[in-house]
């Protein structure tokens, strides 16, 4: 998995995750231009929700995939951005909760990518726990949550068997490979939880 291909997959993934809301904004603007005020409340709602989603996702993507910046030193800001991102995936009926205990600046970017990886596995909400201990970042979800077996299988193949498909859905994992060697990324499963572990030492 070379860097050029990873970059292409990351760009594809980001584009995929924002295009729907960009389309919604374009449709709302089109309705405004037509001057039909009967839909004004709906238009306002579409513009508000779409702009909030786009803002939350782009801020998260900038921090997770972009060049390191001073914002990574503000752990509370990093946590809040992660929470805002997860709100754009979950909903009021199936929210995605987050427990975030990462203290080092170095650990924040891997933690964000791991949050994205595990969030992709969740189908109907759940809770993600991220913690840093002795130079390792551990992100976990409970097995009681409804999990995509197909996406979990792809993750298992990537971690255990080093089968790296050109799949934009796996872009966060491949970017994690850029930060850590494959030998330092592990996946553990038992009856209670699924854990993704990255050794930062």
Image (tube, rainbow, N blue to C red):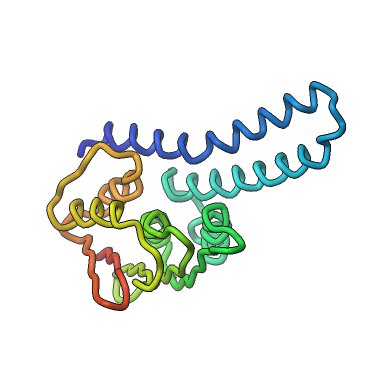
* Residue projecting furthest to the left: 161
The quadrant holding residue 95 is bottom right
Q: Residue at x 41, y 60 (%)?
A: 122
Q: Position of residue 147 (x, y in %)?
A: 36, 61
Q: Is residue 131 above or below residue 11?
A: below
The quadrant holding residue 48 is top right
Q: Residue at x 29, y 38 (%)?
A: 6
Name the residue nearer the viewer: 169 or 147: 147
* Residue projecting furthest to the front: 38
Q: Is residue 34 left or right of residue 1?
A: right
Q: Residue at x 51, y 50 (%)?
A: 60
* Residue projecting furthest to the right: 37
Name the residue nearer the viewer: 92 or 140: 92
Q: Is residue 174 above or below residue 99?
A: above
Q: Is residue 80 left or right of residue 108?
A: right
Quadrant occupied by the N terminus = top left
Quadrant occupied by the C terminus = bottom left
Total marks placed: 0
Q: Is residue 72 left or right of residue 197?
A: right
Q: Position of residue 96 (x, y in %)?
A: 51, 64
Q: Is residue 199 above or below residue 71?
A: below
Q: Position of residue 110 (x, y in %)?
A: 36, 57
Q: Position of residue 99 (x, y in %)?
A: 48, 72
Name the residue nearer the viewer: 175 or 30: 30
């Amino acid at each position: 998995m070379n860097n050029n291909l990873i970059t292409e997959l990351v760009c594809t993934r980001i584009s995929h995750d924002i295009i729907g809301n960009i389309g919604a904004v374009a449709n709302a603007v089109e309705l405004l231009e037509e001057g039909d005020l009967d839909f004004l409340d709906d238009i306002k709602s579409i513009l508000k929700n779409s702009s909030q989603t786009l803002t939350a996702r782009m801020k998260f993507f900038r921090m997770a995939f972009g060049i390191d910046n001073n914002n990574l030193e503000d752990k509370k800001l990093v946590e809040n951005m992660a929470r805002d991102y997860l709100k754009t995936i979950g909903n009021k009926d199936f929210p995605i909760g987050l427990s975030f205990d990462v203290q080092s600046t170095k650990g924040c970017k891997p933690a964000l990518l791991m949050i994205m990886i595990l969030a992709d596995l969740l189908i109907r909400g759940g809770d993600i726990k991220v913690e840093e201990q002795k130079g390792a970042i551990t992100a976990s979800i409970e097995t009681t949550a409804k999990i995509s077996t197909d996406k979990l299988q792809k993750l298992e193949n990537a971690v255990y068997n080093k089968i790296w498909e050109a799949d934009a859905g796996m872009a966060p994992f491949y970017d994690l490979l850029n930060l850590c060697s494959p030998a330092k990324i592990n996946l553990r499963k038992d009856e209670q939880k699924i854990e993704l572990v990255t050794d930062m030492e």
